[in-house]
Amino acid sequence: MNIALWIVQGLLAVGVLYAGWMKAVQYEKGAAAWGWVKEVPKGFVVSVGVLELLGAAGLILPEATGIAPVLTPIAAISLAAVVLFGALFHIFRSEYREIGINVVFLALAVLVAVGRL
């Protein structure tokens, strides 16, 4: 079970790291890739990206280092909330094609949170 959780954590961390990096560090590439980025304030997009980057680190580092491993499920729960709000954001904007990845990330985050609690 531990190995399966590590695989899920790694997949989720890589996906969220990519999305967070595009939003926080490479804003222009994110704006080119996702149409909604151009329609909301840049500060909001960058803030979400920073939260995703922190969440990705929180999925891996506490458990890997053994320093405060209780932070890993907290990071997973926090990422689940960010992804859930992202899905709701896309639903309200009728961007239904964007919701698929949110659902996948949400399922992975919940799996990590439950598995690590």
Image (spheres, grey):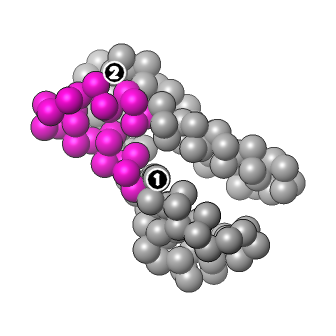
Q: Is residue 93 above or below residue 45?
A: above
Whether residue 12 is in magenta: the answer is no
Name the mark on residue 97.
Answer: none
Q: Is residue 72 magenta?
A: yes
Between 54 and 83, which is closer to the camera in this rendering? 54
As drawn, is 47 to the left or to the right of 6? right
**SS for callout 1:** helix
Q: Decide: marks 2, 1 in contact (CB < 8 A)?
A: no
Q: State the SS at label 2.
A: helix
Q: Is residue 43 above or below residue 68?
A: below
**In the rendered structure, which amino acid carries the disc numbered 2?**
Arg
Residue 66 horizontal/vertical position (percent): 13, 31
Mark 1 closeness class: few <14, some 14–19, many ≥20 residues within 10 Å: many
Identify the image quadrant of residue 50: bottom left
What segment is highlighted magenta in the picture?
53-76
Residue 73 horizontal/vertical position (percent): 37, 27
Amino acid carrying mark 1 in the image:
Leu
The majority secondary structure of the magenta stretch comes to helix
Determine which residue is flagged by label 2: 116
Q: Position of residue 4 (x, y in %)?
A: 32, 27
Q: Which residue sits at x=40%, y=56%? A: 53
Q: Residue at x 57, y 74 (%)?
A: 30
Q: Earlier in the sequence, mark 2 or mark 1?
A: 1
Looking at the picture, does residue 44 appear above or below residue 85? below
* In-front residue for pair 73/11: 73
Query: What residue is shown with label 1?
Result: 51
Disc 2/disc 1 C-alpha distance (Å): 20 Å
Give the left or right position of residue 87, taking residue 66 as reference.
right
- Residue 42 x, y percent position in the rendering: 61, 73
